[in-house]
Structure formats: structure tokens, C-alpha cells
Image (cartoon, rainbow, N blue to C red):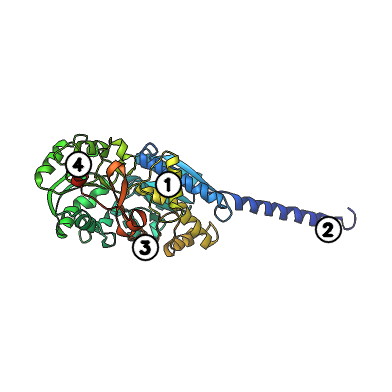
Amino acid sequence: MKKGSGKIFCVTLLVTVMVFIGAAGESIAKDPIKIGFIGALSTPYGASNKASLEISIEELNAAGGILGRPVELITEDWKREVPLAVAAYKKLVLNDKCLLVFTEGTEGSTACAQTASRLYPSQPHLLFAFWTAHHGFTDLVADDYDKYKFVFRIYSMTGDTYNKELGFIDFFKNTIGTKKIALLVEDIGWTEVYRKGKAGQYPTQKEYFEQNGIEVVYYGTTDIKEKMFLPILEKVASSGADSIYWITGYTDTVTLVKQWAQSPAKNIDIVFQSGACSYAAFWKMTGGQALGVNALWPEIMIPFTDLSKPFLAKLQARGSGLLASTYGAYDGPWILKEALEKVGNANDVDALIKAIENGEFQRGFWIWAFDKQRHEPKKGYPYHPVLYGQFQEDGQYILVHPKELIEKTNPDKKFVRVEELRKRAGQ
């Protein structure tokens, strides 16, 4: 070897190694940040959640991704079968290396959270749960923070009924004018607190109405497979009720409303918790018999931000409707983005959790802020509100609660009792 050739070789080798390391670092930097979604894809809410996540991530990537890295969505179908949800969760975390997994449904989310607690020490990640209303879900975080600190609910819970900031009782007493109510509750896991209460924390829904001066003159539970509602509606009509509150999530509200509109209870104001009644298309689904129906989480273009209307237009263009969970599905990836950019990297999940706990986030809708003990979203506009809409003449779906948002959405429209709406329509 000639004199000096060894030095040249070493310099060449060093440059080659540095180029390799630089290329590897650039490759790592551009690897996608993966987000998983476990949804019941054949259901309206599963389809809406999937479409909302897709829109959100498309917009994220168009804006440069997160920390300069693209974002990839990986979707799994749990078909409302818990073992499938758990298997999908393991795949998304262990095989796909998802940093964030969205889960759906109380049973599925709870099982996934328990599985995730065993995976977290070796594969740190986040779980965002929506369409998960059971009040006990975030007891996991409150009871064992270190084990479940990665869990956040980006959705409402049954306990929101008892939150004075949300004006649930005010809606019935002051908007509708309810004095005597018929209360029906789906007999399913997420409605447990409504049916049984929680000692020292929540009364039953029946007790809560009565404690607030509304007499419950008829009470019953219903099966989600029920199709014949006329016998119940006849009993409601003879009970003296001036309002019906039907706590629904999976009940066939299309069939129910068609029967209500032809029953002796047709002039009794009816309010639903959720389901197909939340869709603007519900009017056509019922053949216009939804006149006067009130529902939680209505598909109404509420101008929370400049992005609210464009998002809803994109969602409808994909053949999906707006439901309670689609707010969190659209905003959720942006919560991740802002928190990650505060931390500065995707490797320190404990720091990421703290950034979410200490932050306030807003994209398309209200401001998201989470309490540190339970990881529940802060409630009461401009934070997470509860929204009620009513179908009026010609299928107009108007916002009737809360008043702060009525003024932004339809200030010239207000709630009208169903009997008056029927008179106007000549029914």
C-alpha cells in the first residue's frame, strides 16, 4: 500500500458510514406515524368514524404530516365481537407498531384497554375511545393511573346527564316544558347507570328527573331487538305523560318513530338519546313521520370553527352521516399532532400523555381538554357540549340546545311542541 493510502481509505470509510447513518436517519424520520382504528364497519357509526378518520388524516398529510412524517391509518373490523377486537388490537400495536389506536364501543374498548395495559410496558402507545359511553370506562384511569394512563375518552359518557354545565334538565324543563315524563331505557351495558345508578355518585335516571321536579309517570326498559312499540306507546298515552325520553343507542328508531306517529302518543313530545335519529336523512328514512322528533347529537352544520362546514361536506360526499363519535374521530389525530409537536418526538409516550393532560386542542369543533384523574373531556361549551336537534316542517333539522350554539347556528328558529307542528302541517 502506498504511503497515505491508508489515510485515504479511512476517510472514505468514515464518509461512507456517515452517509449511511444520515440516510438511515432520514428514512426513520420519514417512516409513517401509524394510527389504528378498530370499528364495526358494517354499522352507520363504524362507517362514519372510518370516513372521519380518513378525512382527518388526509388533511394532516396535506399539511405536512406530524413532525415531518406522514400519517398512516390502519383499519380493522371487530364486527361487535370482543375477541375480534382484542386480536385486532394486538395486531395494531405489536405488528403494525401503531402509536395511537382508536377503539369503539364499551365492551370492545374495555377489553382492548385491559389488553393494552399488558402491552404498554414493552410497546408504549395511546388508546382513544369513542362510541364508549359507559361511565365506568375511565374508572380504569382513576383507579390505577400508572396501569391505564394511556387511555383517553374522546366522547360523551352517561354521567354527562348529571353534569349541570350541560343543562340536561334545563332542556326538558325550560325548552320543552316537561312536567310529566315517560322514561324508556335500552337494557344494555352502556345504560347501566341510568337504570341502576351508582352509589354515592349518580342516582338512577328516574330518580334524577323526580329530584328535579319532573314526575316520571311511566317507566320501562326495552330490548334493542324490539320491533313492536305500539303496546308501549299506548301505555305511555294513557299515563298522562307530556314528554317521552327514550334512551337509545341501538334501538330501531326508524320503526319506532313510524309507529309513534300513528299511535295515541303522537302528540307527546319525544326525545331520543342517539341512533339513526341523529342523521339528517332520518326524515326521509321515516317518510316524513319524524316531524317533532328531538335527538341528541343531530347532524346539523354548527359553525364551531371555519373547518366545521367543509368537514361535514366531505363526510356527506362519502355517503356518511355525522354522529356523536365522528367529532372525536375527526379531531383525534389533530390532538395527537399538536401534543407530539409539543414533545418534539414520537418516542417518549409518557411525555406525550402529559402533553395531552396539560393541553387544550381545537380543530373542527369545540375545545378538547382532559382532566388528569380520569382522562374525560372537559364539558360545557366552548368545551365539549351536549347538542339536541328537532325535526320541523319539511324536514328542517334545527338546533334546540344549548342556547350558546343556537345563536351561532339558527338564531331565528326555536323548539316547537309536536302538537303545534302537527297543526301547522294539517295532521
Whole-angstrom CA distance, mark 4 to mark 3, is: 34 Å
Amino acid type, mark 4: Thr
Look at mark 1 in the image and give the residue it sits on: 312
Give the foreground label among 2 and 3.
3
Amino acid type, mark 1: Leu
Front-most of residues 164 and 401? 401
Whole-angstrom CA distance, mark 1 to mark 3, is: 28 Å
Disc with the residue nearer the chain's start (4 vs 3): 4
User: Callout 4: helix, strand or loop?
Assistant: strand
User: Callout 2: helix, strand or loop?
Assistant: helix
Percent across and percent down for residue 7 are 83, 58
15 over 294 or under it: above or below: below
Percent across and percent down for residue 34 are 51, 48
Please give the name of the residue rendered at 19% of the width and 34% of the height, measured from the top-left corner: 228
Near mark 1 (Cα within 10 A), the count class, few <14, some 14-19 or many ≥20, is many
Give the foreground label among 2 and 4.
4
**Picture quarter containing residue 141?**
bottom left
Front-most of residues 204 and 294? 294
Disc with the residue nearer the chain's start (2 vs 1): 2
Give the foreground label among 2 and 1.
1
Please give the name of the residue rendered at 9% of the width and 43% of the height, measured from the top-left corner: 238
Look at mark 4 in the image and give the residue it sits on: 222
Asked if marks 1 and 4 touch (Cβ < 8 Å), the reply is no
Disc with the residue nearer the chain's start (2 vs 3): 2
Whole-angstrom CA distance, mark 2 to mark 3, is: 61 Å
Disc with the residue nearer the chain's start (1 vs 4): 4
Name the mark on residue 170. none
Whole-angstrom CA distance, mark 2 to mark 4, is: 84 Å
Amino acid type, mark 3: Asp
Look at mark 2 in the image and give the residue it sits on: 7
Name the mark on residue 371. 3
Amino acid type, mark 2: Lys
